[in-house]
Image (cartoon, rainbow, N blue to C red):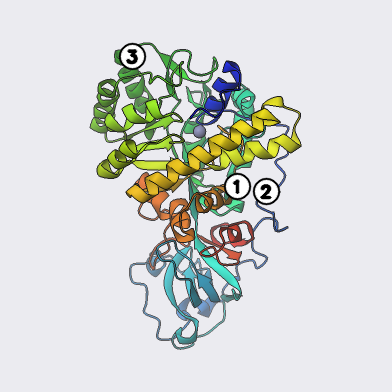
Amino acid sequence: MHADADLTRRRFLLASAAVALAACADQLDPSPRPSGSASAGTAVPESADAPARPSADATASPLPADTPTPAASPRATAAPAAAPVRRLYRDGALADGRSERLRVGVSVYVVDGVIEWIRPSDDEGGRGSRRGLEVIDASGATIVPGMVDAHSHVTMPGGAHWIDRGLDAPSQMAAVAEANGRLLTSAGVRWARDVGAPRGEDREDGRTRALSLGIRDRWRASGSRAYPHIRAAGTWLTRANSLPDGLAVEVRDADALVAAAERQLDEGADLVKLYLDGPDPRTAPWSAAEVRRVVRAVHGRGARVTAHAGRLAGARVGVAGGIDALEHGFELDRDVAAEMARRGTVLVSTLAVFRSWLTFGRTTNQAQFRGNGASGIRERLETAEASVGLAARAGVPIAAGTDFGGGSLRANQLAWEVESLVAAGLEPFEALAAATWRGGELLGEADAGVIREGGPADFFLVHGDPLSDPRALWRMWRVDWAG
Ligand SMILES: [Zn+2]
């Protein structure tokens, strides 16, 4: 079961840490644009067509003359000085992760960042003035909801030294977060759920707390759609000696664990993250009853609890203790999967972490990724894929994460996890659901990962059909919200 038995204990700890953990930032890393996301050679999706500046009469002539006026839309009451930016995406395909059927011949009309309507391209309705309307020929492209990276670490960069980067200076982490924000947007990721950041002093707001929280606050306050929406746990809460020094908030007993969880919320965390791989990964660091105490306290504050569990022992106590989501779940058995399904516990998958490590066998000199190390990684991947498959068949809701930063992936590589879920046995539409609306449900955000009339125009366009080939998600063309 423990495929990495040949790793040294130190390496084992590092490997476990990777997975929920943190590592921050290689500030010198120029973060080359989606070299990953650009496996198809495309660069960033930003559109070439700048929003047309509508002429004065454009405001009075929405596209098709018979288009119902969007009474509820913010534009209806906007000051006349600011003409709305109107875009019509015409004749694209649509994949929303709700159905295994790709809709073709779809037009989407967007006004000031809100989806006015979604209609068949051959039945858009009457034709009004086109003046001021940007018509985008979306033919051959597929429209996909902005994705949700359900497991990320926005202050850290990933790479083969990901854990070391978790010990970098707060100023470096702030710079890395800025780069990550651009990478996320360029890859079609609209929301990122940050599940752990090192604690430190934020130079901007002067506060000492999880460094993700100041990033979240500033991106939100900026009002810029170029930044992803962030929901952030604070710092990992661990039993002492579970992670390398300096990364986590360490506690020694359950009273201290509850107090630490409440402190995270006091400091502004949206959710609480427990670390359930203990100093001995085969033994859970807390009992189910102890986990339940934390869950009750956090739920009492209106927040949710999630838990890292790479190993079965931690998964067992976490699920039995009532956590809302389980991160990684690389070792699940039928009993745990059945209990997760019964409780509605979400599994956040991060399978691509192992695939990333396997690439390091060729791209680095680090011994743990080569030879026997690589064999152990392959075995862990197989075990993890079997666990995800087990959960899916049991009816466990699955959301997709990269673990970028806390693991070795980069911020623009969520497509890799979608591919990995399909390899683990999910249907492509289920894998797309995991990267879109399932993540939105996990966040409790109705608009996250969703395309709907009246909702935000948070969608992007790719070439290919992600409902038959998840690699289509790498083939980025354009991100509407960044345009
Ligand atoms: Zn992580």
Mark 2 surroundings: few (<14), some (14-19) or many (≥20) residues within 10 A: many
Query: What label does residue 36 carry, if any?
Result: 2
The image quadrant that residue 7 belongs to is: top right
Mark 1, residue position: 413
Question: How far apart are the two marked residues, 1 and 3, measured between alpha carbons?
Answer: 36 Å
**Viewer-proximal residue among 32 and 49:** 32
**Viewer-proximal residue among 130 and 398:** 398
State which quarter of the image contains the C terminus. Answer: bottom right
Question: How far apart are the two marked residues, 2 and 1, measured between alpha carbons?
Answer: 6 Å
Mark 3, residue position: 256
Please report contact status of discs 2 and 1: CB closer than 8 Å, yes or no: yes
Q: Is mark 2 within 8 Å of ligand 1?
A: no
Question: How far apart are the two marked residues, 3 and 2, measured between alpha carbons?
Answer: 41 Å
Q: Residue at x 51, y 19 (%)?
A: 243
Q: Nearer the viewer, mark 1 or mark 3?
A: 1
Q: Is residue 349 above or below residue 28?
A: below
Counting from the top left corner in percent of width and height, residue 430 is at 43, 57
Q: Amino acid at mark 2?
A: Gly
Q: Residue at x 42, y 71 (%)?
A: 116
Counting from the top left corner in percent of width and height, residue 17 is at 53, 25
Q: Is residue 371 above or below residue 57?
A: above
Residue 323 horizontal side relative to residue 300, left or right: right
**Viewer-proximal residue among 81 and 87:** 87
Disc 1 on helix, strand or loop? loop
